[in-house]
Amino acid sequence: MSTVYDGESGEFVPPQEIAAAQDESLLQVLGLQVEFRTRDGVAKVLNGVSYHVNAGETLAVLGESGSGKSVTAQAIMGILDTPPAFVTGGSVTFKGEELLTASAERRRMVRGEGIAMIFQDALSALNPVFTVGFQIAEQLRLRRGMGKAQARAAAIELLEQVRIPHAAGRFGDYPHQFSGGMRQRVMIAMALALDPEVLIADEPTTALDVTVQAQIMDLLAEIQRERAMGLVLITHDLGVVAEVADRIAVMYAGRIVESGGAREIYRRPGHPYTVALLESLPRLDLKGQQLNTIKGLPPSLTDIPPGCPFHPRCRLAQDICRRQVPEPVPLDAARSSACHFTGELMDRV
Amino acid sequence: MSDPTVAAGEPMLEPGADLGRDDSGRRQDRPRSLGGDAWHELRRKPTFVVSMVIILIVVLMAAFPWLWTHVDPNAADLSRVRQGPSGQAWFGYDVQGSDVFARVIYGTRASLLVGVLSTVGAVVIGGIVGILAGYHGRLTDSVLSRFADIFAGMPFVLGAIVILMTFNAPGSNPGEVRIVTQVVLSIAVLSWPVAMRIMRAATLVAKQQDYVKAARGLGAGPLRIIVRHLLPNTVAPVLVYATISLGANIGAEATLSYLGIGLRPPVVSWGVMISDAKDYFTVAPHMLLFPAAFVSITVLAFVMLGDAVRDAFDPKSR
Amino acid sequence: MSEPILEVTDLVKHFPVQVGVLFKRTVGHVRAVDGVSFSLARGETLGVVGESGCGKSTLAQVLMRLERATSGSVTFEGRDIFSLRGQELRRLRRDVQIVLQDPYTSLNPRMTVGDLVGEPYEIHADVAPRGERRRRVQELLELVGLNPEHINRYPHQFSGGQRQRIGIARALALRPKVIICDEPVSALDVSVQAQVMNLLGELQTRFDLSYVFIAHDLSVVRHLSTRVAVMYLGKIVEIGTDDQIYEHPTHPYTQALLSAVPLPDPEQRGRREVIRLTGDVPSPVDPPSGCRFRTRCWKAQDLCAQEEPPLVDRLGHPSACHFAEERPRIVPTSA
């Protein structure tokens, strides 16, 4: 592209400097490709995913099941099961250091201390046969060389930070003795133990009730602010994203179809998929709303349609969409959309 | 107005006029049952192929022993007593001067018959008791489970000795059919609790599934729920157990025959042959080694088959 | 309001908590549903919302007569469903159907779609003659937006949304009057969820169905329901029309629940009133005395621990709180 779409004036203008934003990126993913080799064929799970997160910033990775949002996170962490998963291209850099080619030893160092991750299902992410205190303290002893008493004190402090009532008393409890919300807090405490600079939260509140979800999201936002961490929030919930995200990356069939500032994307989505998602969402604050569905299903990853992967479900699809994969078009310094008709779509609003 | 994308009165894209018909045409058109999938999976597994080839050979030996040897297994020639393997008799001769190879071939039938029948018996008893206990729960379950525990608590060999000795006083010579029946029943009676527990556990899991709830909501009776909804979903683990236990039961037959309380001459079985060979191992090891090898290989084949079948039925292993 | 099709009065369902292997001892009761009353009018959708453990799924089971009630009554077209026997019970099974939450466990994996959707006709053989069943099954598949040619496929060959359509076709087979929807869309992705919700809406108009729509997602409930009941620990705390519950909630729990729902609109950040409950829902084995919500309520006073607030209409619709009052800006009003 030799020109950039300017959202303000609605015209294509010469490219601006967009590299500046990426220099300070804490974590950067560039053109990441992952495939799953199974007996039913090769599933192209990630087809060139790029995003970055800066210190003190919340990036929401939004997508439906099978869009590859969790696989991206696992590839960043280096915890994909190989086989069946193989990283076939792209790069992941943390503070400028390439992780994909780093030694296993080095990657282990980065896990926990550089980038930590929390999962949807805290019950299965915590080891059921050890007390939660032991699990947190163990990390501190192994990685920080703390003594037993010191690690215990630090673990209790972490449990207090995530607002577990009577933290000292609950140090010796097992994971199953905690409620769902409390377990999620324990997992957050554990992820924070080594003071990571980036926290990846994979659907952290999906399994929780709405009042507990609100508590956990508040906690995550607060911790992120206090520690100036980069937060990658992986979710399918458009509501959660709207409440906490600074920037959004929308994923579909292993690609980022749209990315940009949260407010801008909600106000004026630049990709037909984002538009359709927002229109198919029932809303608390709307009465008698007409839900516009997206026809059909997300594509099978072993058989992604040629051209734009969204074209069979897209109401704007034309011939070019069936032939040519749309590259992400920068709309302004922070936004891009991978659609042949972004300009037309945005002009309609 | 807070959200122009939705509230602007008119959506940016035309509203979906239809109900969003699903197009599932991209998926395979061939109807595939879970059993079909399992079979598809199995055919590519070397362990499955190897074990099936061995089992096929064993079955053919049992069904048509005359295809494999022209020698009469009971023909005795005392001049050849305990001769080792040779070009004429590949496995040598036994203490009666009979051809060991011919006897191994003819012994297959009794060994396999005992293995198959006792397994079928154990699985049928255990399966029925297990599914009833699991489906009804509460008191029925408690009673049936404790009843099964009584049988499961008996040591196998001791139990079989007691049963068989009770029916056949030492020195008596029961008929062929009678002793085979007795051995089959003793093995079945002592091993059904395992099948029962597997079936009960599988039923307890299946019973919790929503589709059972849905069927009850439609007004389905207990028989329909057991036959249409529970059984097809619980039979796989029991089948796997049956395959593995079939091999074990062939071994059990050999054990009982070796102890002199199972099959006995004139019946020819691998166990009987091992029993015959026990006093001559140092002078004529071939008498023991060949039938024992057949037992081992057959047991191994069934265990391998069971393993392969279990992997194929377990969707998580895919 | 017209004659209610379904009427629930003081419904109670307690599950005994038992210990022991052979001789079981009851050590307490899970008070899953503890005195619930409501009525459902013909052609209406009553949404039932609440968090996990509030008893909404048990309520569905009891309404379907899959569980017996501990006490109280459920009448369908004027007759108590727990006293029905034989032919009358079969009739009830045809009139009241259920759609379950999990599209992966609610369909028997060993049966084809044809068998699944046709099973109602096998159980109720008088509804459709044998020769006609296949055609009827295909019509039903067509009706819910599935390809009728896929009649010989197995559930695992379909996606989650398609499976939920199969479940709906099965529930529709006997032409029921009431469908209990137990979280029918909560396992689905947003884009597929909208398809299924639209389908449910369309079928309701077409067949004059009444729904009891149980869900934890307040936005989904608002979209489909004409009236809404909010449950907390086995009790209805507030019940009213769509507008009354969403725009003029008076019970603190309803207010907290609505306030906690994130809105898909970044412009609303900081403009809504935030009510954050602390702690978790208490155990239904040992619920708090008096008002069950008092342990998490910011308005709680001594009275709340002593006296259970009745579900009475003081501010336009029934609300079970001693200190019920409206509170503005819980849900911002959009166009």
Image (cartoon, coloured by chain):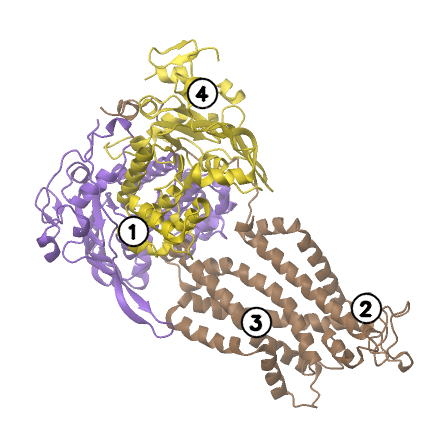
Chain colours: A yellow, B brown, C purple
Closer to the camera, A91 or B147? A91
At label 2, the amino acid type is Trp
The label number, if any, that marks residue A167 in the structure image: 1
Q: Is residue C162 left or right of residue B90?
A: left
Of circles 3 and 4, the one toward us is 4
| Discs 3, 4 touching: Cβ within 8 Å | no
The residue at 22%/50% (across/down) is C232
**Crowding at label 1, few (<14), some or many (≥20) Cα neighbours within 10 Å?**
some
Q: Secondary structure at mark 1?
A: helix
Q: Chain of mark 3?
A: B
**Crowding at label 2, few (<14), some or many (≥20) Cα neighbours within 10 Å?**
some
First in sequence, mark 1 or 4: give its number.
1
Of circles 1 and 4, the one toward us is 1
Q: Position of residue B15 (x, y in %)?
A: 34, 26
The residue at 48%/10% (across/down) is A2
Query: Can residue C109 be seen in this snapshot?
Result: yes
Q: Position of residue C220 (x, y in %)?
A: 29, 39
Q: Is residue B290 left or right of residue C297?
A: right
- Same chain for the residues at labels 1 and 4, yes or no? yes
Inter-mark Cα distance, 2 to 3 = 31 Å
- Same chain for the residues at labels 2 and 4, yes or no? no
- Same chain for the residues at labels 3 and 1, yes or no? no
The residue at 60%/42% (across/down) is A39
Q: Chain of mark 1?
A: A
Of circles 2 and 4, the one toward us is 4
Of circles 2 and 1, the one toward us is 1
Q: Which residue is mark 4?
A: A339
